[in-house]
Structure formats: structure tokens, C-alpha cells
Amino acid sequence: MTPPNLRVHGLTKSFGGVTALAGVDLTVPAGQVHALLGHNGAGKSTLIKCLGGAFPPDSGTIEIGGTPYARLTPRESIAAGVAIIYQTLSVVDALTVAENIFLGQEWTRYGRIDRGAQEEAAAGLLKRVAATCSPRDRVGDLPTGQRQLVEIAKALSRSASVLVLDEPTAALSGAESDALARRVEDLRTEGLAIVYVTHLLSEVERLADAVTVMRDGRVTHQSSVTGLSRGELVTAIAGRPHEQTVRPAPNSARQATAPRLVVEGLHGPGFGPVDLSVGEGERVGLFGLIGSGRTRLLETLFGRRRSTGGTVRLGERAVAPARPAQALAAGIALVPADRRAQALFPPLTAQDNVLLPSMRPLARGGLRALGTERRVFGALADAVGLRPALPGLPAGAFSGGNQQKLVLGRWINTARQVQVLLLDEPTQGVDVGARHEIYRVVTGLAEERGTAVLFASSDPEEIVALADRCLIVAGGRVVGELSGASLTEQALLSAVHDRAVSGTAVHDRAASGTGGTADVAPDQHADPGADNDPGPLAPPAEGAA
Amino acid sequence: MTTADTALFRPRALATGGLAAVRRHPLILVLAAMVLVFQVSTGSFLAPANLSGIATDAAALAVVAVPLALLVISGYLDLSVGSTLALGGLVAGRLANEGQSPAVAVLGALAVGAAVGAVNGVLCCYLGLSPFIVTLGMLTAVRGLDQQLFPLPLSGFGSGFAWLGGATIAGIAAPVVIAALVLVAGALFLAFAPGGRHVFAIGVNREAAHLSGINIRRTPFLLFVATGVAAALAGAVKASVLDSVVAGTSGAGFELTVLTAVLIGGVALTGGSGSILGVLLGVLFLGGLQNGLTLLNVPTFWQQMAQGTALVAGAALAYLAPRTGR
């Protein structure tokens, strides 16, 4: 009997007293897609970095195609047939597709790179992964999905037998994700052993043959996917029974009271005109595909981008922030989508990460109020359930979920008075457990402090769990609204996917779909015609008639 | 890396802080070894007169190294300080020659330094030009300006102006007192002023700092101005100590020496990390190295080789040291 492509046995690894892997076993035979699940910080990243040779394990063996290794260098790992596609792709933007695929293993002829042969071979590999790009395209010009396929093609060119995909769909659009799923199925058929790291249970259900769940560096669940329920998986990941994502009663009373954020005819590059309003203590979701303009809308409200027209009012006061600092002064805060690039200061301490923008307001006589800072941080750490609650630990050492709590905590601590909280993909790269804590914190903020929450998400489950009301966004415009009992995952998905397929022409259908639900609250706030707007091109005034 | 300065000012933490400081700044051990070697080989390295000589020489370095370190931590760089130093010395010297009071002479130098720093700051922070290119250009341009405005060497500044470089305050040379004040101010700023944390934040992640409402232009702009002011102040002090300034040569190469001290002191050229304690160690190390080698009659070019090797060796050690954390 042939040995499995990958067998990991008793792998341990610790970092200065912190155990990252505590005896992990994992076997992936040829032709299997093996999902690897677990919280951020559960040890998945450490495991795949040991496979890729980035870290030497402390003990245990990694067996690839029957050959055991106590440790691997990155070069040995590649030679042994392991290919790892990390979340942050390692393609070189300035080179062509073919040059990227053969980077480090160039085909030469008389000492010169044989471009023709490379491009021909690259074309074959690209066809195998069904990439639509050409071998001569510059990788920097390609969308993320194509770049990822280039990396997979590169792995195939090295005749990899073990393919590790680290949250491959995190940065992909819905259509790109579907395409990737089909490629993964093809590669399984070709006999690769595939380790698929993901947070999305739907991907496990669709793609995986077997699943391993890790928690605190240990394997807590390992089985085939057949016959496994979603509840069992969530329990294994969270380490406790699944909290049902029961929607709280929609906050229509709040909506009726006072609109806190009112946006009228706002437009800017890539979106608009947009009309919307968020009541005091109301949580409004913006649901749409990546590229639908949600992020641009939020960034414009926050002053990171300039609007080209329209008005934004906070209560009665008109605001037009030209910089984030001005938005913050007015009481509008944003938690951006890309935590690493836009929000986190990894080497700075947890406390600094939370309190950086509040140090100046808290300071007395130009000096930081260190005691107050510590108290504010302590209270926040309790409120959001930060783990570990160590003020001096660098933010980069926390798990993704806890990093997100730090970033969220920047605006919701007791030193700040935020009127409007904008969240862009609030739980991207956040594990299931922390996700529910973040929902709880945001919900509590809206209910107790009356903060108006406007958040964008491409995860229907998240919209249903967090929103009182949801606006459907496509092509930079609000094209529909769901609330009450009509706000379901199915309704969201059909609203967006219908739209993605047929473009803006289906607007009437979507509008009748939303308007037709009996429980959509009639428009009671100062937002003329947002619900009954006959079409996105019609000026708002007409809808009010 | 970023809490070292805070720990320095909490007496309770001093004992454990000492050990932590050694771990954070292995340069302390290198410095100690160097002192030992020089003392054994020269017999006079630790003599009070020599130590005070080292301190006075290192003072100008320290005055500029502190704001420069803050600038580098925030992700910027200033290569123009050598020429600004000369300009500061020339302006102060000319004012002293014209019979102005030492205070006016120094203030004149500081104003000119602030102007050079402001030009750097506007170009780099508000117009977004590359600090490397801008300040490299300014290094040459200001040197040209120095020579255009002051074609002849200046000297004979008078006893009033000589006070700046020659006086002792409680037995300590005035330049050393000035350097100590600058070092303490820098450390206090990093630890206790909100702007100190902003410096780190901007250096670590500019975009995140911007989205956190931190003014990512004004803080580094002010640091450019501070660096220009400090360079001019160092120039005035040097002019006073030497009682001479020459437009073509004063402070030539100073910009690289001070940057070397900052980098040996553990400030990351990529921004986001560094400490004033490290800068002090870097300055003492370079100053001590130069002095010890001079005592040993090592020729100047060997000294330069030693200085350069120390920088590269320091970088190599930092690279080879085991990294912690995931």
C-alpha cells in the first residue's frame, strides 16, 4: 500500500514558553481534501509553517510521500513536494505570469532564460487550473483570484504532491471563490493531498472529505465529513455548544425615534448617489459583493475619501469630514476591513493600540494620564473579553479575533463618545468564538449607548446575526432593503446573486421583493423615499411624491 | 522595545528593568567590554579628564541624535544635518562677531536651523516627497549656501560666546548639560507625551495612524523642524568649543556619524521601533570608540573602518539574534 502523501506525527512547537502545537497528528492521503479548522491562534498557522519549513518543529515527524523529516527548510519542503499558498500571496507583481511560475527554476537555453518554452509550459499549467490570464500578463495587473491561480500553477510546475491552501477565499469575490472550489475539486481528482485552512463551514461542507479541528495547539476533532453536522463542527471549534444565531427582535422602535445618521444623495468615485439613515441605537447592515461600493461609502462617511456631492447629517448637524480626524471629532468612527494594513500596530502594546487616539484627549497638562489609560484599558478588556487581557503584550501576538477586539476597542472604550460606528467586514479573519463576542459587544453598544451602527459585510450569516435592517448594495447604490422576518440568509443571497447575474436591470424585481414584504416598516424617518424609490437613477425628491 | 523608556522612570521597575534593558540593548554589554579593553590597554581611558572629553565630544552627537531618532522612528530620515550644523555655527559665529549677545547668536542659529527643517518637513510630510532624496539634496544645497554666505572662515567669537562651549555648570561642561537636557526631554516625550506614542504609531503603520485620527503630517513635520534646530544648536556649540567655523568643512560627514549612532542604538531604519536609551548608548559607543582609538594612536582611517564595521556588525548581530514571537 502506498504511503499517504502527508503524515504528521506528534508534532510539537513552542515559542518561549507558549505552546503553539502540542502533539499534532494529521494524515492526508492522495485525493483527499482535508479541512483544517480552528480559532485564530489555535495552531493552524504554526502547523502549516512547520510544513513549509518556515519554523523547525520541536519534536515529532513530518512524513511526505513516506519519507520522514524531523525538520524542513523551505527549500527541502518544496523539493519534497509541499506547496503552500499563504493568504498573502507570494507572487512578484512586476514579473509576468510565466516568470512567476518558473521563478527560481527558470528554464534556460545556452545560459539564457528560454521564455518561449516557459510561456508554452505556463500556458499548459494555466489551462490545468482554468486560469483565464495569459502567461505574458504582468501579475500585478491581475485580480486576486487569477494571482492565486498563478500560485497554484507554480505549485503544479514543481509537481507538488501536497497542496496547502491558507484561507484561500478570504480575499476572493463570490464568483472567484466558486471557481477556486472547482479547481480544488479537479486537483483532488488528479491525486493531490490538499490541506484546506478555512473559517467557513460552508466551504467544509462543499469541498472537504475529512476535517481536523484544532484548539490551543491540539487536535480536538478529526473525522470524515460525511455525517458530520454543522453543530458538531461549531462545538468542536468553539469548545462549547453552538450559540444559535437567533436574530434579536428588530429594533424598529429605535428606528422610529431619532435618525442619528442621515445620508442624502451622497456620491463619490465608485458609488452613489446613496440615501440612507440610521436611527439612534439602530444597527444597519450593508450587504453586497466585494466591489459593490460598500467600502467606498463607509470610507467617505469617515473622511478617508472625498465625496463629490450630497449631504451627511449627524442628528441636525451637517458634517463633511475631509479627514478621518475630523470625522472622529464629529463622533464618527470606522473599523476598517483590512486589519493588518489599515488598523493594527502589531509591535505596539495592546494598550497603545486601543488608546492611541485617546491619549491626547485624556492627557493633563500635555502629559499622558497613565493611570487613567490603564483603567480605561482594563475596563475595555473586560467588556470585550480580551484574551489574554495583558496591556503590555504586543498586538501582533494576539489572535485575529482578539486583534479585532483591540481595533474595535479603540472606538468603544469609556474614553470616547462615538455617535456613529462604521464597521467594514467586522469579523473578517475572526474565529467563531470571538465573532459572537464582537456581535454581543456591538449590540450592547447600540442598546446601551444608543450608538448608530452601520456595517458592511459579505457574510449573510453576519448580517442576519447583527443587523436590525439591511440595505442591499450593488453597483455603488442601495438597491433594496430587508428587515424584520424577511431578513434571512436566503433572501440576502438571492437579492445579491440575482443582481450579480443580471446587473442593474433587475432593480424593479428586487424593489418589489423588498417592498412587498408586509413587515417592512413604513418610512418614518427623514429619508424621503429610500424604501419606495422607484429606481436608483431617480432623484430622491421624486420618490417623496 | 517601546516600553523601555517608561520603565526607566518607574523606580519600582528599575531593578528588573536593568536586566530587561540589557536584554533589549545588548549594546550595554558591548559598551562595557569596550570600556574595559580601552582602560586596560591605555590606562587612562577612565580618567575623569578623558571621560569629560568624551562627553563633550559626544554632546553634539547626542543633541542631534535624539530628534533624528524620533524622526527615524516615525519612518522618515534627515541626511542634511551636517550642512545645517555648519550653517548654525556660521550664523551664531557671525552674530557673535558683530557684537550680538550670545543669546541672540544662539537664537539666530536656531531660527535658521528651524527654517531648514521646515523646508525638509514641508517637502517630505506635506508634499510627500522621498525624505532620502529631499534631505540628500538639502545636504548639498545648504552646504553650497554656507559657502556662498560665508566664504571666509569665522573665528574670534569673544569670551561671551565661548561660555556656551567652555563653561561648567556644577562641574559639568555646558555642552554635556545641554545634551543631557535634550536626552531627558526626548525620553520624557516618548514616554509621557501623547505625541511620543504617535511617533511610533506613524512609523509602524501610517495608514492605520491616519485612520485613527492621528495627524500623520504635523508630527513628523515638527520632528524635521526639531532636527534642524538641534543641528544648528550643535553647530553653535561646536563653533563655541573650537572658536572657529569653516563653511566648507564644519560638520562634513556629521550626518552619517549621527545616523550611525542612531542605528547602532537600535533604532530601526524602517521606522516604528527604537528608544532614547538606545540612542544614548549608540552615542557613547561611537564617542568612546573614537576616543579610545585616538588614545591608542590608531590612524584616522582605521578609526573610520572601525566605526563602519561596528555599524554593520551591529546590524548583523541584530539579524542573527534569535527572534521571539510568532
Image: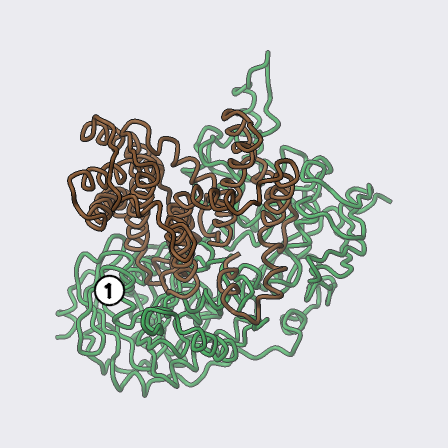
Say above or below: B259 vs A272. Answer: above
Residue annotated with mark 1: A274
Q: Quadrant of residue A464?
A: bottom left
The quadrant the C terminus of chain A occupies is bottom left
Locate residue A194, reporting x and y percent: 67, 49
The quadrant the N terminus of chain A occupies is top right
In-front residue for pair B297/A317: B297
Please give the count of numbered marks on the rendered protein.
1
Q: Is residue B303 left or right of residue A283?
A: right
Q: Residue at x 47, y 31 (%)?
A: A95
Locate residue B313, reporting x and y percent: 59, 36
Q: Is residue A9 left or right of residue A205?
A: right
Chain label for disc 1: A
Q: Which chain is green?
A: A
Q: Is residue A310 left or right of residue B232?
A: left
Colour setup of the view: by chain
Say above or below: A69 vs A27. Answer: above
Amino acid residing under circle 1 = Val
Q: Is residue A37 left or right of residue A275?
A: right
Q: Residue at x 29, y 52 (%)?
A: B222
Locate residue A474, reporting x and y percent: 33, 59
- Is residue B201 in sight in this rendering? no
In-front residue for pair B244/A521: B244
Dot 1 falls on a residue whose secondary structure is strand
Q: Quadrant of residue A456?
A: bottom left
- Is residue A484 in sight in this rendering? yes
In-front residue for pair A235/A345: A345
Extreme residue toward the top, this view: A110
Chain B palette colour: brown
